[in-house]
Image: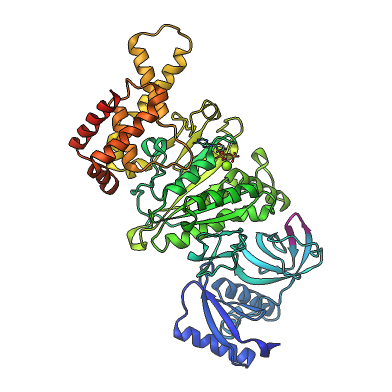
Amino acid sequence: MENEIKTAVLYSDTKPSDAQTERFVKFLKEKYQTGIELCWEKSEGIKNGFRLTVGNDVYDWTLDGRFRQLKKYIKSMAEEETDLIPLLKEGIEKWTPAVLSSETGTVLTVGDCVATVGGLKNAFYGEILIFADGVKGMVQTVDEDICGCILFDESEELLAGTPVRHTGKIAGIPCGTGFLGRVTNALGLPIDAKGAIESEQYRPVENAAPGIISREAVNKPLHTGIMAIDAIFPIGKGQRELIIGDRQTGKSSIAIDTIINQKGRDVICIYVSIGQKTSFVSNLVATLSKYGAMEYTAVISASAGEAATLQYLAPYAGCALGEYFMERGKDVLIVYDDLSKHAVAYREISLLLGRSPGREAYPGDVFYLHSRLLERSAHLSNELGGGSMTALPIVETLAGDVSAYIPTNIISITDGQIFLESSLFYSGQRPAINIGLSVSRVGGNAQTKAMKKAAKTLRLDLAQYREMEIFMQFSSELDEETRRRLLYGQGLMRMLRQKQASPLELHKQVIMLIAAMGRCMQKTSPDQVHEYLESLVSRIEAECPEICRGIDDKGDYSPEDEQKILEIARSVGD
Ligand code: ATP
Ligand code: MG
């Protein structure tokens, strides 16, 4: 058996030095006496040392592993002798790593993709375990003798008593540019029948978020192409903006439109679909392909029919893929659709693992579940390449209740939320963004000058209009001033209506806003606002292309440009 082994793999965070490599080669020669080739693989999960795998044998060469082994040794020796100092000396000098994988465990209980395993004393959180029939699982809870494990496959052959082996490997997914344009499951395996995907790196699904020093403030805009968002709730690269609302209020559509708008802007998009129907995913891919957006998008899907364990893992896997690109200096946009279903999947797993439930039957650590995911979004400093990962998590509410457990958690983790309302949606105001309850806390710093200047008091005007609208429901006679204000507000609301998959370029949004804020639409009835704005934009595009180019390229315009736009806007209205 040993003669068949050709290579030994050494895992560690940093590359071993020549002296260290020499030591490992010597160790292999002594243990196996054959010409085994040693190769190194980067594994970020292994700090303070190395992990060596030779065929089935795993050696723990980390600091923790050494301590554990030394402790055991000294304990056993101390029973016979009393003087500890020479024992310590001997223990340190004689230390060679013991085989970890000789430790086999057995399945104690199994069901619903969760298993408890006994006898694996050296298991660690996040480790992949292999069950006798090839099923893989990930360690989630570690007790003294028992560990709880989530399974990636369902298998009928898995019974109580089935043997379980260590792998010493942290759960991760393969990453690489090959994933763009593809649909994979939560383990990074393709599910689109387009063949295998070539990967460039294997990354742990769980990873620590970048620290304070590694981050740069959010200062670059990420345009969604949706005017209501870009003008009032601007999103910056590296920001986390929650999309929240009842079912069927256009949440996913906002995320999809944002992805479509990234075409030609050098942004890599990742769509993580959690607990959705398979038909949704196939429609999503069809829509993205139709607009040429699949070229720069990777889709990770754990649909409703799949095991809760895969639904639980999917967003972390997507995030790991996003980090791969972010660390290479790219701008990444990641959508988690949706995190309420993720929380439900986690609740299921936790209850099966025997964790005690708390509020709304979720375990108490559900906050950590999402904070450790969303904190991984960042705008990295220039020293680290200046890449960014912008997150658009989606949460579904019940009857508009934003004060439920999961929504309040995620609202407090993110940098703002876009709140979608059913009543607006059904009244035809789509996207159905509630201006009063939505906010973007950091994106304002990243907004382009052109947008900031053009949007002026839009938010305030809309808020006033909403109040007036409610108040006016009770009165029949309106004076001229009030009527004018109402009409102005209605015009603004109409302007913010936007069809799906029709993102507006920056210059179009700015022109429309300048005209609207300059009260040029007063003579236009709300029903004709869109026609008016369309003809205005096409006239300016034809007559002053340099203004449009200036806004798109430099993100700014001069006071003369503004006068010119207003002049044309007034003449279009006549
Ligand atoms: P779910 O809760 O099922 O996930 P959702 O909130 O994600 O729903 P979507 O699936 O995005 O909502 O949209 C719901 C419906 O509204 C779809 O049929 C979509 O076509 C329509 N819709 C969304 N946005 C718009 C829009 N701007 N204009 C017209 N129709 C829209
Ligand atoms: Mg949806």
The number of callouts visible is 0
Is residue 164 visible in the rendered image? The answer is yes
Q: Quadrant of the C terminus?
A: top left
In the foreground, 190 or 44:
190
**Left or right: 219 in relation to 142:** left
In the foreground, 74 or 292:
292
**Left or right: 175 in relation to 511:** right
Q: Quadrant of residue 444?
A: top left
Where in the figure is residue 137, as x and y percent of width and height?
68, 63
In terms of image quarters, where does ligand 1 lie? top right
Q: Quadrant of residue 535?
A: top left
Where in the figure is residue 268, as x and y percent of width and height?
44, 56
Where in the figure is residue 561, as x and y percent of width and height?
21, 37
**Residue under the point 43% across and 19% down:** 467
Up-down relation of residue 183 to residue 29 (above or below): above
Residue lying farthest top?
A: 477
Residue lying farthest left?
A: 560
Dominant SS type (magenta): strand
Q: Quadrant of residue 301?
A: bottom right
Up-down relation of residue 174 to residue 450 (above or below): below
**Residue under the point 49% across and 34% down:** 419
Looking at the picture, the colour scheme in use is: rainbow
Where in the figure is residue 7, as x and y percent of width and height?
59, 84
Is residue 176 visible in the rendered image? The answer is no
Question: In the image, is residue 70 part of the stretch drawn in magenta?
Answer: no
Q: Quadrant of the N terminus?
A: bottom right
Up-down relation of residue 487 to residue 501 (above or below): above
Magenta residues, start to end: 110-116
